[in-house]
């Protein structure tokens, strides 16, 4: 898989390769079972049931790094954060920030487009209980590293959604930019900000999960502040 990831010549090639990954047996079994049994509300739909590639502007100045696709969201629709309540919150915020052309994301062919922004996840398959193992994270890392390498010429800011994504950035920093992670590594927190020399700046944001948005731990205003800051740092009007 490492070889296939590094051989990807562009994002389209990378996306095709990601969609054909079978490297993690537990995740393959889970994503396939979810796609076979389906949720009752979606029983008439055909699930994607495969790894979910990144999505957005190939010349992105801002990247949003998530954890993994949702079982009945990206694993169903084939596009990250599409068709689930986390995505409802995220894309509404991106639209308010002027980074998305519409506030909703319900299907892969719904016309959504992102402006100077790309979204991808640390793990590309939906994991049981939304909890990938460290081994699965590390096995999937070459896809993330190659995607960041391909958008490296324009990338200026990475917004890490949650502590898992924040932790996934440090190996990417070493692999893609040849920069050793800072020691000690900066702690994740909402609004956390790290920057180095000639590398993208990193912003922390609570994940847009229902656990955070339904309880008020993450509010629309808090998201708006993060994306406004990301735009300023990235030089996006």
Image (tube, rainbow, N blue to C red):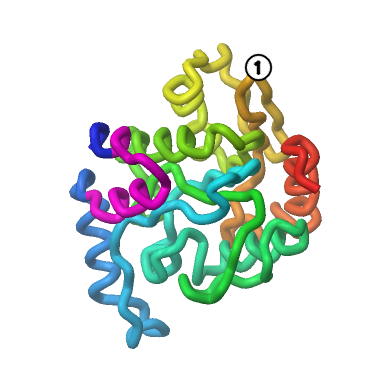
Q: Which residue is at the far bottom?
A: 44
Q: In this orientation, which residue lies closer to the viewer: 147 or 191? A: 147
Q: Residue 160's image quarter?
A: top right
Q: Which residue is pictured at 23% across the width and 64% down the height?
A: 32
- Could you say whether the residue bearing mark 1 is in a helix, strand or loop? loop
Q: Quadrant of residue 193?
A: top right
Q: Above or below — where is 1 with respect to 198?
A: below
Q: Is residue 214 visible?
A: no
Q: Where is 194 relative to 227, above or below?
A: above
Q: Is residue 125 magenta?
A: no
Magenta part mainly helix, strand or loop?
A: helix
Regarding residue 107, the answer to whether it shows in the image is yes
Closer to the camera in the image, 163 or 113: 113
Residue with the mark numbered 1? 197
Specify the quadrant of the image occupied by residue 185: top right
Give the image location of residue 201, x and y in percent.
Answer: 66, 29
Where is the N terminus found, in terms of image quarters? Answer: top left
Magenta highlight on residue 10: yes
Q: Residue at x 50, y 55 (%)?
A: 55
Does residue 75 appear to the left or right of 3 in the view shown? right
The stretch of residues the image draws in magenta is 5-21
**Residue sitting nearer the eye, 34 or 78:** 78
Q: Can you give x and y, in whole percent of width and height, for residue 23 in the image?
A: 21, 44
How many circles with numbers are drawn on the protein? 1
Q: Which residue occupies 51% across, 15% down?
A: 179
The local crowd at label 1, few if under 14, some if 14 to 19, many if 20 or more residues have their Cα within 10 Å, is few
Q: Tell me where residue 106 appears, x and y as whole percent.
A: 53, 74
Residue at x-position 51% and y-position 69%: 84
Position in image of residue 118 (x %, y %): 56, 50
């Amino acid at each position: 898989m490492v070889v296939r990831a590094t051989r990807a010549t562009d994002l389209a090639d990378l996306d095709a390769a990601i969609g054909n990954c079978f490297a993690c047996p537990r995740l393959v079994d889970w994503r396939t079972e979810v796609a076979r049994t389906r949720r009752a509300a979606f029983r008439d739909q055909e699930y994607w049931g495969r790894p979910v590639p990144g999505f957005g502007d190939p010349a992105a100045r801002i990247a949003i790094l998530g954890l993994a696709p949702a079982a009945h969201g990206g694993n169903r629709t084939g596009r990250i954060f599409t068709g689930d309540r986390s995505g409802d919150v995220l894309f509404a915020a991106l639209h308010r920030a002027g980074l998305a052309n519409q506030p909703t994301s319900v299907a892969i062919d719904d016309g959504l487009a992102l402006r100077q922004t790309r979204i991808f996840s640390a793990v590309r398959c939906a994991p049981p209980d939304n909890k990938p193992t460290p081994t699965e994270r590390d096995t999937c890392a070459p896809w993330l590293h190659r995607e960041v390498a391909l958008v490296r010429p324009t990338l200026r800011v990475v917004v890490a959604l949650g502590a898992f994504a924040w932790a996934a950035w440090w190996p990417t920093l070493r692999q893609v930019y040849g920069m050793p992670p800072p020691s000690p590594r900066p702690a994740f927190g909402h609004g956390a900000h790290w920057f180095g020399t000639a590398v993208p700046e990193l912003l922390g944001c609570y994940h847009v999960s229902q656990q955070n948005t339904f309880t008020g731990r993450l509010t629309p205003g808090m998201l708006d502040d993060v994306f406004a800051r990301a735009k300023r740092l990235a030089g996006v009007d």
